[in-house]
């Protein structure tokens, strides 16, 4: 674990299995709270007469030419974590593949931001950035998303573009940078971010008035108020492409089902890391899509759909 994290968290007790027997709520000074199954917010059980409209509509925006898989991963994670409806706005070239893989989702091929407007009007939560690219197409879609007054999860190229184009994120949004993206957003080196991960996460949360999820070994969740949480779960087998795309979909699904941004970030990060830890026991070769069914199982164990 990063030395900066170890310095802030004086004592971290080992745990066994995905579900921690006791909450880790006491932490010294300005140290983060250690996330567990007990201190993460639970989704309410669903009523017997529930319908899809009760659980939000996630719109995933991204997937420039050659990177359509990123939006597929985010959309699948949002679907499997309980969003009532999931749509994808992407390059027209990806629509057929997306519908083949995920027929339960709605796909819209867009060539410009103007074609995005009708889809934005029907969404309740946005995912912006997976496979978005930094060319004119991605820039135009990002600008349109930023003007939508909806909770949003920004990742990948949305963050790289944000580093060069000051934009105000809507209230209730979440940023999910890895250390390199965090460095670009703060105008410092990656080494400086890693040397003080808690400080970097807090600065990003304050700068963008949003919840910041600083990914890496010991993922941190920071609020603009300075509140900080640490996820001590995970596995080195998670070092691979696409896992961040899965995380964005999980976070969006929790937002769509009524969680606030802090609660969604803490629970989503914990579920994602626990799934990776469970699968990591099989060793190398963990694919991002492997996480999705395990996250679904963990979410049901944590927050039963029906009681």
Image (spheres, helix red, strand yellow):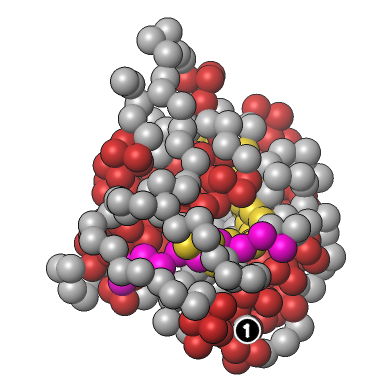
- Write down the quadrant of residue 103 in the picture: top left
Is residue 38 depicted above or below 135 in this figure? above
User: Could you tell me if residue 52 is visible in this image?
Assistant: yes
Is residue 116 depicted above or below 90 in this figure? above
Instruction: Give the total number of marks visible in the rendering.
Output: 1
Q: Is residue 139 left or right of residue 259?
A: right
Assign the magenta stretch its main secondary structure: loop
Q: Is residue 137 left or right of residue 215?
A: right
User: Quadrant location of the C terminus?
Assistant: top left
Range of magenta residues? 226-235
Residue 230 is a magenta residue: yes
Residue 158 in percent (x, y) is at 66, 62
Residue 295 is a magenta residue: no
Residue 144 in percent (x, y) is at 77, 47
Viewer-proximal residue, 85 or 189?
Answer: 189
Residue 280 in percent (x, y) is at 23, 68
For the point 76% across and 83% down, the residue is: 187
Viewer-proximal residue, 91 or 42?
Answer: 42
For the point 42% across and 20% down, the residue is: 46
Residue 75 in percent (x, y) is at 45, 44
User: Could you tell me if residue 57 is visible in this image?
Assistant: no
Residue at the far top in the pictured view:
49
- Residue identifier under label 1: 196
Q: Is residue 270 left or right of residue 263?
A: left
């Amino acid at each position: 674990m990063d030395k900066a994290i170890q310095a802030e968290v004086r004592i971290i007790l080992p745990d066994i299995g995905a579900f921690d027997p006791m909450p880790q709520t006491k932490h010294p000074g300005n140290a983060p709270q250690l996330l567990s199954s007990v201190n993460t917010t639970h989704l309410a059980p669903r009523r017997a007469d529930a319908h899809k409209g009760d659980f939000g509509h996630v719109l995933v925006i991204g997937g420039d030419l050659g990177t359509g898989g990123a939006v597929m991963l985010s959309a699948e994670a949002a679907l499997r974590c309980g969003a009532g409806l999931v749509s994808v706005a992407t390059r027209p070239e990806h629509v057929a593949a997306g519908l083949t893989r995920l027929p339960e989702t709605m796909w819209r091929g867009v060539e410009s931001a103007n074609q995005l407007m009708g889809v934005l009007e029907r969404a309740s939560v946005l995912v912006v950035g997976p496979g978005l690219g930094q060319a004119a197409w991605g820039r135009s879609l990002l600008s349109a998303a930023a003007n939508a007054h909806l909770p949003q999860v920004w990742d990948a190229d949305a963050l790289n573009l944000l580093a060069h184009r000051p934009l105000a994120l809507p209230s209730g949004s979440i940023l999910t940078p890895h250390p390199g993206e965090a460095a670009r957003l703060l105008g410092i080196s990656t080494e400086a971010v890693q040397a003080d991960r808690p400080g970097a996460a807090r600065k990003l949360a304050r700068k963008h008035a949003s919840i910041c999820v600083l990914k890496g070994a010991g993922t941190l969740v920071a609020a603009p108020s300075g509140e900080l949480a640490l996820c001590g779960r995970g596995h080195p087998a998670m070092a691979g492409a696409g896992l961040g795309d899965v995380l964005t979909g999980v976070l969006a699904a929790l937002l769509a089902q009524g969680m606030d941004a802090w609660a969604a970030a803490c629970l989503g990060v914990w579920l994602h890391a626990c799934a990776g830890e469970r699968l990591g026991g099989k060793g190398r070769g963990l694919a991002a899509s492997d996480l999705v069914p395990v996250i679904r199982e963990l979410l049901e164990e944590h927050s039963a759909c029906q009681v």
